[in-house]
Amino acid sequence: MMNISQPALSKWLSQLEDEIGITLFERHSKGLRPSEGGKLLLQHAQRLINDLERSQYEIARFKQGGLVGSLKIGCSPVATDCVSQAILSLLNEMPTLHLNIEEKVMTPLLHDLLAGQVDVVVGRVGGRALQLPLNYQVLYTEPVCFVARPPPSAGRASADRLERSGTLAVDSLANRHPYSHQY
């Protein structure tokens, strides 16, 4: 496969580990398993491979006279409206831009971003994800409301009556454009 003997590969791996100062693999009776340091190096290697593949693609487009440029976007299901509007604006400005959009839930998307498999991610982020070594930009905030039925003694309130009384502003919520950031 690689035309290298097992002893030569073991020697090379040992030299590499000595050179970078960490153990890349944990040796077990059933073979090798990547160490935490090995997993980290693997993430960086994957980014390099992804960058090389993108470079090859963009060079091929350049040779054909196309404008060089591509963008890989990771999008969570809750952000598809935001992303689709941004894409339309972006393509108006850069019609030859090659876009690749991948829709997933946030955790795998953030892993893809860290591994260099996507360039940007759009979606809701919170909790431990905010501690990742990434740059964050809030695009908009959503109003969060506490909504409850009226108590039974208050009688049956209709949405129309609540709207007339000013308690419920249905039109302002329905017509509200949720994106405060212009693209």
Image: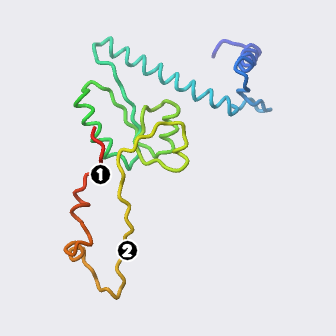
| Quadrant of image for the C terminus | top left
Q: Secondary structure at mark 2?
A: loop
Identify the mark nearer the N-term, 2 or 1.
2
Location of mark 2 (residue): 148
Quadrant of residue 27 within the rendered picture: top right
- Using the rendered view, name the quadrant where residue 157 is placed: bottom left
Q: Is residue 38 left or right of residue 117?
A: right
Pinpoint residue 178: horizontal percent, then vertical percent: 29, 51
Instruction: Decide which of 21, 109 is in the foreground and name it.
Output: 21
At a point 62% along the width and 26% down the height, the residue shown is: 41
Packing grade of label 1 (10 A; few <14, some 14-19, many >=20) is some
- Asked whether 141 or 14 is in front, the reply is 141
Which corner quadrant holds the N terminus?
top right
Q: From the viewer's perspective, is 37 left or right of 74?
A: right
Q: Position of residue 117 (x, y in %)?
A: 47, 31
Amino acid at circle 2:
Ala
| Residue 47 as seen in the image, left or right of residue 6 | left
Q: Is residue 74 above or below residue 41?
A: below
Residue shown at the point (47%, 22%) measured from the top left = 51
